[in-house]
Amino acid sequence: MYRLKREILFYFCRSQYFRTWKSSYQTHPCRHG
């Protein structure tokens, strides 16, 4: 299950919608990206 969760998080991290928030939300959970 952990693998699936990580895959979803990764997809959400690369999502364009999330990328737009990254500009305002610098404290995103995908700091490794």
Image: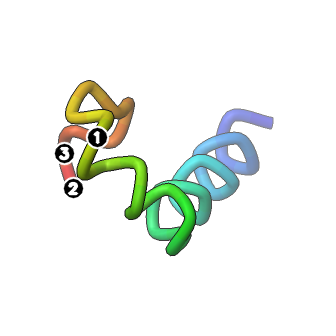
- Return the mark for residue 10: none
State if disc 3 and disc 1 touch (CB < 8 Å): no
Q: Which residue is mark 2?
A: 33
- Looking at the image, which is closer to me, 16 or 30? 16
The N terminus - image quarter: top right
Quarter residue 15 falls in = bottom right
Residue 5 image position (x, y, % from top left): 70, 41
Looking at the image, residue 8 sits to the left or right of residue 32; the answer is: right
Whichever of labels 1 and 3 marks the residue nearer the N terminus, that label is 1
The C terminus - image quarter: bottom left
Outermost top residue: 27
Looking at the image, residue 6 sits to the left or right of residue 19; the answer is: right
Outermost front residue: 24
Q: Residues within 10 Å of mark 3 (few under 14, many from 20)?
A: few
State if disc 2 and disc 1 touch (CB < 8 Å): no
Kind of element beneath mark 1: helix
Find the distance from the CA under tag 1 to the CA under tag 3. 17 Å
- Camera-side mark, 1 or 2: 1
Q: Amino acid at mark 2?
A: Gly
Q: Which residue is mark 1?
A: 24
The correct choice, above or below, for 26 with respect to 3 in the image is above
Residue 7 image position (x, y, % from top left): 63, 57
Quarter residue 6 falls in = top right
Q: Which residue is mark 3?
A: 32
Kind of element beneath mark 2: loop
- Looking at the image, which is closer to me, 32 or 24? 24
Residue 18 image position (x, y, % from top left): 49, 56
Find the distance from the CA under tag 3 to the CA under tag 2. 4 Å
